[in-house]
C-alpha cells in the first residue's frame, strides 16, 4: 500500500536516476548539513515519571487496546467545516519540519520496539542519543529544496533555475480531468518500474520520499514544484530568488491560513505576546509526537478525487496502487511509468465548497489507517494501526500527559465527565481500567479536548479548532519557528501581492481548475 508507512521512522535511501539531474549550477554534490535536534517543550515534566502515563506491566497492552478502540466508520455526521486540503497541508508541513530517525543496530528492523510487551519509556539520555531529526532547516521547505539522498539538488539540467517535474503517462481508460489539458507536467520525477526491487519501483526523485506515499500528498508536492517554476517564468527569477519568494508565501500560508484555521485567535495572541518555546533549543517532541498528529483524525475513508473517480477509497490512493493501474494491491513493475493522466487531482474538490470535508477533530480514526501495508502488500511491522503507533511512540518518548501540560499552562484540565462525553464506551472503559482517565496520553487528550471544546455552546461552537492545550502547543512551535527565522515576514514585514490563501497558492501553481469544474 505504501512505500513508507505513515508515521514510520526514516527509510533506507532510495536509488536515484542521476542522469535526470544535474548539480546546482555545476556545483559538486554537497554533504548533508547538520540536522535540527529534538527536545522537550517541558523538559522537567518529561524527566519525572509522575507526569507521564501510568507505567505498569500492562501499559503496552492498554495502549494497544486503546488504539484499537479508536477505529471508526466515516459517518457524514462527523464531517467538519474544514476542507480536506488542510488535512494534507498539515501532513506536508509536518514532513517539512520533522523527519525522525531512530538510531539502531543494523540487524534491528523495529527501531522503537513497539511490539515489545515489556515496553517502557526510554530515558532522557537514550532519547537524546537515539532520536534525531533529519531535517536540516525548519519551515524552509527543506522537503522541497533539500539535498537528494545522493547529495544532488532536485533541478533539471536544461534549466537549473527550475525544479524538476515529471510528465504524466497518457491513458485510454478515462479522459484527463477538466481544466488539466495542454500541460503534461503533473507528476514527480521517478525511477523506472522494477519487478525485481519493489522498494525501488518508480521511486519519486524528491528530497523527502514520504511526500510520495499517497496521491494527495504527492500532488501537493507537485504544486510546490510548479509554483517555484511559475515564479521563475512570471518574474524571471533566479533559482534562489524563486525559492525565497515561495518560502515567503509558504510562511504566510502557515500563519495566516493554516494556523488561524486550527487555533483560536486568543491563543495565537497569547503566544505572540508571551511565548514559552525557545526555538534555538530544538524541536519539541510534545509537538512532533503529540499535538501535531491531530490531522490523523481528519483523514477520510474516501475522497472525490476527480470526475473520473468521484468515490476513490483511501486505500486506492496509495501511490503504488495508483501506478499499478488501480489494482487493489501494489504490483511491482506493472502499470504506468508515471502518474496516469486520468488520476490528476481536481483541487477544487478539496477546497471550500468542494466535495471533500475533513473529518471532525475527535479521538477516532477511519478504518483504513488501522491496516497499513508496505509495497508488497504485507502488514507493516510491528503495529499496523496508526493510532497504536502514535500512542506507543508517545509513551516511549516520555510525552507528559495532557493533564500535566494543562496544569503547567494554567489551563483547567478536562474532567472525567468531559472525556466521557467525547469518548466511546469502549474507550472510556479502557481509560478507566488503565488509569489513563486522569493521566491521559497527550495525543488522545488533544483529540478529546478538541472534540469537547468544539461541542460547547457559545462563539466557538462548531469552529472545528484545537482546544487550549493542543492549540497552544501547535501555535508555540509554528510561531516560534517563524519568529526565529530572520527571513520570515514576522521579521521582515514582507507581504504577498494581494490576498494569499491555499486556493491562491494552487492557482499560482497552475493546478487549480476553473471554479465550475
Image (cartoon, rainbow, N blue to C red):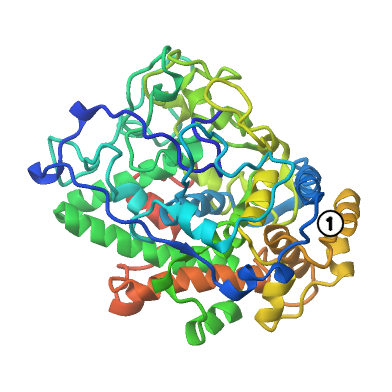
Q: Determine whether, in the image, residue 216 is placed left or right of residue 170.
A: right
In the rendered image, which residue does mark 1 sit on? 423
* Above or below: residue 58 compared with residue 241: above
Residue 313 in view of the camera: no
Between residues 454 and 275, which one lies in front from this camera angle?
A: 275
* Above or below: residue 373 compared with residue 441: above
Relative image position of residue 32 (x, y in whole percent): 27, 49
Say which residue appears at 14% left-offset and 44% top-offset.
Answer: 24
Between residues 90 and 115, which one lies in front from this camera angle?
A: 115
Between residues 95 and 399, which one lies in front from this camera angle?
A: 399
SS for callout 1 = loop
* Above or below: residue 19 compared with residue 102: above
* Above or below: residue 467 compared with residue 74: below
Q: Determine whether, in the image, residue 329 is placed left or right of residue 202.
A: right
Category of crowding for the residue at label 1, using alpha-carbon neighbours closer than 10 angstroms: few (below 14), some (14–19), many (at least 20): many
Say which residue appears at 38% left-offset and 17% top-offset.
Answer: 193
Residue 459 in view of the camera: yes
Say which residue appears at 62% left-offset and 69% top-offset.
Answer: 47
Amino acid at each position: 500500500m505504501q512505500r513508507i508507512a505513515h508515521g514510520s521512522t526514516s527509510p533506507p535511501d532510495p536509488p536515484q536516476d542521476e542522469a535526470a539531474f544535474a548539480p546546482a549550477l555545476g556545483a559538486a554534490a554537497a554533504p548533508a548539513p547538520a540536522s535540527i535536534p529534538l527536545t522537550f517543550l517541558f523538559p522537567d515534566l518529561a524527566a519525572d515519571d509522575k507526569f507521564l502515563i501510568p507505567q505498569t506491566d500492562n501499559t503496552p497492552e492498554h495502549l494497544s487496546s486503546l488504539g484499537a478502540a479508536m477505529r471508526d466508520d466515516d459517518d457524514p455526521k462527523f464531517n467538519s467545516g474544514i476542507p480536506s486540503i488542510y488535512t494534507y497541508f498539515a501532513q506536508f508541513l509536518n514532513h517539512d519540519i520533522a523527519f525522525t530517525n531512530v538510531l539502531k543496530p543494523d540487524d534491528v528492523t523495529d527501531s522503537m520496539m513497539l511490539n515489545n510487551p515489556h515496553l517502557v519509556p526510554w530515558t532522557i539520555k537514550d532519547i537524546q542519543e537515539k532520536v534525531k531529526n533529519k531535517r536540516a532547516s525548519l519551515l524552509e521547505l527543506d522537503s522541497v529544496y533539500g539535498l537528494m539522498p545522493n547529495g544532488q539538488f532536485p533541478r533539471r539540467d536544461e534549466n537549473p533555475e527550475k525544479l524538476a517535474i515529471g510528465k504524466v503517462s497518457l491513458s485510454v481508460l478515462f479522459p484527463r480531468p477538466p481544466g488539466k489539458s495542454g500541460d503534461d507536467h503533473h507528476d514527480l520525477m521517478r525511477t523506472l518500474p522494477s519487478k525485481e526491487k519493489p522498494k525501488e519501483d518508480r521511486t519519486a526523485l524528491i528530497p523527502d520520499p514520504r511526500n510520495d506515499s499517497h496521491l494527495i500528498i504527492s500532488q501537493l508536492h507537485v504544486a510546490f514544484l510548479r509554483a517555484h517554476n511559475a515564479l521563475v517564468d512570471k518574474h524571471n527569477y533566479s533559482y534562489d530568488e524563486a525559492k525565497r519568494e515561495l518560502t515567503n508565501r509558504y510562511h504566510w500560508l502557515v500563519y495566516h491560513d493554516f494556523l488561524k484555521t486550527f487555533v483560536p485567535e486568543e491563543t495565537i495572541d497569547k503566544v505572540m505576546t508571551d511565548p514559552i518555546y525557545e526555538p534555538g533549543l530544538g524541536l519539541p517532541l510534545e509537538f512532533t509526537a503529540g499535538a501535531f498528529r491531530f490531522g490523523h483524525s481528519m483523514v477520510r475513508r474516501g475522497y472525490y478525487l476527480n470526475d473520473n473517480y468521484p468515490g476513490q477509497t483511501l486505500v486506492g490512493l496509495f501511490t503504488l496502487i495508483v501506478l499499478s493501474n488501480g489494482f487493489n494491491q501494489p504490483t511491482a513493475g506493472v502499470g504506468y511509468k508515471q502518474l496516469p493522466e486520468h488520476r490528476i487531482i481536481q483541487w477544487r474538490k478539496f477546497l471550500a465548497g468542494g466535495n471533500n470535508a475533513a473529518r471532525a477533530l475527535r479521538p477516532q480514526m477511519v478504518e483504513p489507517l488501522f491496516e497499513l501495508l508496505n509495497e508488497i502488500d504485507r502488514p507493516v511491522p510491528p503495529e499496523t494501526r496508526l493510532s497504536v503507533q502514535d500512542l506507543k511512540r508517545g509513551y516511549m518518548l516520555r510525552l507528559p500527559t495532557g493533564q500535566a501540560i494543562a496544569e503547567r499552562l494554567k489551563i483547567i484540565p478536562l474532567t472525567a465527565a468531559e472525556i466521557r462525553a467525547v469518548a466511546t464506551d469502549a474507550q472510556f472503559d479502557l481509560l478507566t481500567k488503565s488509569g489513563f482517565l486522569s493521566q491521559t496520553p497527550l495525543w488522545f487528550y488533544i483529540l478529546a479536548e478538541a472534540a469537547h471544546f468544539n461541542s460547547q455552546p457559545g462563539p466557538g461552537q462548531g469552529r472545528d479548532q484545537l482546544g487550549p492545550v493542543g492549540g497552544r502547543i501547535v501555535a508555540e512551535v509554528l510561531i516560534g519557528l517563524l519568529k526565529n527565522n530572520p527571513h520570515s515576514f514576522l521579521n521582515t514585514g514582507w507581504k504577498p501581492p494581494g490576498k494569499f490563501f491555499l486556493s491562491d497558492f494552487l492557482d499560482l501553481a497552475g493546478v487549480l481548475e476553473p471554479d465550475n469544474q
